[in-house]
Image (spheres, grey):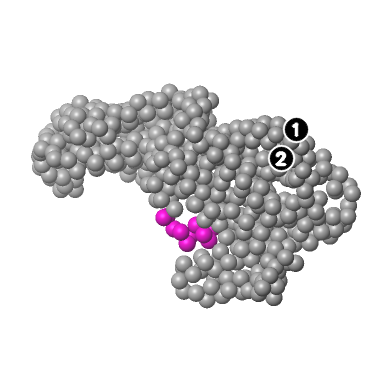
Amino acid sequence: MGISNVFELLSGVALFLFGMALMGDGLKLVAGNKLELILYRLSSTPLKGILLGTGVTAVIQSSSATSVMVVGFVNSGMMKVRQAIGVVMGAIIGTSITGWIICLSDVGGGDATGWLELISTDTLTAIIAVIGIILRMFSGSSTKKHVGDIMLGFAVLMFGINAMSGAVSGLRSSQVFIDMLTAFSNPILGILLGIVFTTVIQSASAAVGILQALSITGAIRFDTALPIIMGIAIGASVPVLLSALGASSNGKRTALSYLLVDLLGVVLFSIIFYTANAIFDFSFMSMAMSSVSLALLNTVFRFIIVILLAPFIPQLERLGKFLIKDNESDAEALRDMDRLEERFLAHPALAIEQSRLTVNSMAEKAKSNLFASFALLENYSDDGFDHVSHTEDIIDRYEDKIGTYLMAVTGKELNREQREDVSKYLHTINDYERISDHSLNIAECAKEIHEKHIRFSEPASRELAVLTAAVTEIITIAVKAFVENDLELAYRVEPLEELIDNLCDEMKSHHIERLQQGVCTLSHGFVFTDLLTNYERVGDHCSNIAVAMIELESDSFDTHEYIISLAEAHNHGFDEYYEEYSKKYSL
């Protein structure tokens, strides 16, 4: 095998991987969001999960993509870990479909019959490519363009397979190559090769496809292929594990379940198969493998390990909990969300009270996360940034869970007071979630300040400290007023919010003056302006929370009208409160 063959092999691998990606992306775009909705809605039992996981993965040609999608569902609280494990098992089976598609490269071979004898592989591939490019370039329909992408991807994949097969065809007479492959008939070495190879190329389907291309040499025997395929199954878990970095504990458990199913499946299958082989001495172990027999072996192996482990999904879930412990914030969030029990929906008063407690927890977390982001401006650390980011994810889950629960409550018969409470909670959970979003934005500003070694001028630092103190007070007042349902305290929010707006405007003017004088640089200016914008937005959301409390108490909800009337009529001590805060937070 010369250097030209090596380059031909590498180009074939590149074409194959690109074709797979193009075809998979096209399939996903044709399917739209339907596959995600199907997975989310119809995976209520392990059997349904396995069937759906198999079907979806067969369509999008990637077990990793399906599993990553499921990790996202679990991470957001939309799906339980136990449901997700069933889908993951289905994905493990579904990814073997690509091997059967690759077998189409045998069309027109010596075993073909009938009309297929008239069509070579290259001719069929070329026809598909031409149709694909016509659809891609000349069709006005986006769906037809995506179908064109699918056909082009398939054609590129086939060209890649043919290039790989042509590059290695000379190895069929190489004793060195045959001896090297024979060494991997050792199960441990074969499994390790499969793991490493799949980890590098990040695709089990591609790894099996390359193995199928090598089968043209006739040197791939059953005893070599089986351990490599088992290793490929384990290596396929790496992209899924990487996708779970930064996910919740349940998200990490879902990703880990992919590895556990394949790892435990390989161990069980190996024990059973190699023990039986030692007793019965299977004659097919030295059988040369073709592209079709490799596809069959891959599918049967994956099907068997899922059959072996499907009855133990609850045990796999418990093993995941044992291996990945809940961190303190996750555990607290789960306890809070456990309050939103569906059985309480039959008793609206109880369901609304549980919602109130959960929204209060969300409010306190949003406030704490804002304070944590302020602390990063003074003393930045990567751990502190990760804490803010993780808490922001948790607060997103609060919003999803509480919003869904409250919408279910609205379907029940409620009295006037209950309707007001539900409306207030629905209005405010979005504000708490947005406050947490701005906390993350502030943390990102702190990270930029730290990494770029930005130092604000003394006047800018002093003004920012004043504004931080004002925003600290407004979030404290807003959350306290909400949690304690204190309307008098809520009336303090709008005057302080107006002052914060004026402070931000004044600070922007001062900042422009410092830029003109050369005291501050443009790089300082961007991050300083970003901070002011986020501070101002936090004040706006605190105002929304207070307005929701006040207006809903009067059985109306018109935020804009309320703020105008409050300022114009100087009601509820607006002027006095504004004067008080103006003296307290003066630049």
User: What's the residue at 85%, 48% (across, down)?
Assistant: 177
Please state the extent of the stretch shown in magenta in the rendering.
25-34
Q: Is residue 26 magenta?
A: yes
Given residues 290 and 174, the one toward you in this image is: 290
Q: Amino acid at mark 1?
A: Ala
Residue 531, position in %: x, y?
Answer: 41, 40
Residue 449 drawn above or below residue 296: above
**Residue 299 shown left or right of residue 380 in the figure:** right
Query: Are there few (<14), some (14-19), or many (20+) residues within 10 Å of tag 2?
Result: many
Residue 278 bears which disc, if any? 1
Magenta part, dominant SS: helix
User: What's the residue at 65%, 58% (across, down)?
Assistant: 102
Q: Which residue is mark 2?
A: 227
User: What's the residue at 44%, 35% (across, down)?
Assistant: 82
Residue 84, position in %: x, y?
Answer: 46, 39
Q: Is residue 387 visible?
A: yes
Quarter holding the C terminus is top left
**Residue 453 shown left or right of residue 392 in the figure:** right
Q: Amino acid at mark 2?
A: Pro
Residue 41 drawn above or below residue 272: below
Q: Quadrant of residue 129?
A: bottom right
Q: Is residue 546 visible?
A: no
Q: Is residue 496 magenta?
A: no
Extreme residue in the front direction: 280
Q: In the image, which is nearer the foreground, mark 2 or mark 1?
A: 1
Query: Are there few (<14), some (14-19), or many (20+) residues within 10 Å of tag 1?
Result: few
